[in-house]
Image: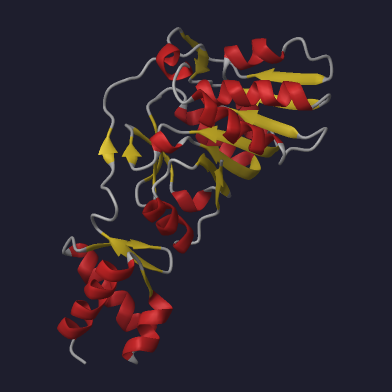
Amino acid sequence: MLASQRHTIILELLEKEGIVHTADLVRRMGVSSETIRKDLDSLEQSGQLSRVHGGAIPAVSARPPQASPEYISFQTRSSQHLDQKKAITRYAATLVREGQVIALDYGSTSQIMALALKEHFQKLTVITNSIQNALLLADCPGFTIILTGGVFNKEEFTLTDDSTPLLDRLHVDIFFMSATGVDPVIGCTDQGLGEARFQQQMLQNASRTIVLADSSKFGHASLVKICPIGEVNLIITDSGVPEDMIHTFRESGNQLVVTA
């Protein structure tokens, strides 16, 4: 079978099924996995598909990521999608165990997560760069709060650009990470340049990273790349995510929990 014929079959399957798997293409066409990988690479270079772990998705799959260049204030975000954020953090709290070390970044979903931890636990260590989170948890007698140092960001109520070696030495059981953009190809993105170091450091320190993102974040890409989707262990969202995008995430091997 000629390469052009294989390419036609691959694109037809993509249009029909929304995703193709390398192993399935090897069986269908009776060629080696290396040949299929070269086919997928060629089609990606020509802009006809996007490679994902174990296969490929259409280059314009579902809905293309929408750029979000404009900064959205903390106050505005705090009033948006509250029911969804509460459902997400309610589920996330069930994954925590008494006495664990938890990392929280900044933002409105992170603040609601802090409230969920306060409600359900007596003893935790919480590492955060958010002054708001630290204040919310300050009256929990059994909580140890580690607030990172750095420059005060008046818009986000965070401490950024921490130059101390403290972050490098901390072990974290679970890092609950927020994001303003979640896309299967681009990955997790955020709008906070100064906050990115904390997020990326906690990714390295944590045994488990869980993304908390309501459905409005899916299919969007913000300014700062935090990590590829494959670097997080779980994504928790709400039922507003389109079915085709849920299918794309799960078929790519990503763990996704959809709350009610």
Query: As displayed, is residue 9 above or below residue 213?
Result: below
Nearest the viewer among 49 and 90 is 90
Query: As displayed, is residue 106 above or below residue 242?
Result: above
For residue 210, side relative to residue 189 (left or right): right
Quarter of the image for residue 180 reads top left
Nearest the viewer among 219 and 143 is 219
Q: Residue at x 71, y 26 (%)?
A: 117
Does the rendering let one see residue 106? no
Q: Which residue is drawn at 66% across and 10% down?
A: 135
Q: Which residue is drawn at 61% across and 32% down?
A: 89
Quarter of the image for residue 68 reads top left
**Residue 62 spot, x, y in % from top left:** 29, 53
Number of residue marks: 0
Query: As displayed, is residue 216 above or below residue 106?
Result: below
Does the rendering let one see residue 166? yes
Nearest the viewer among 198 and 81 is 81
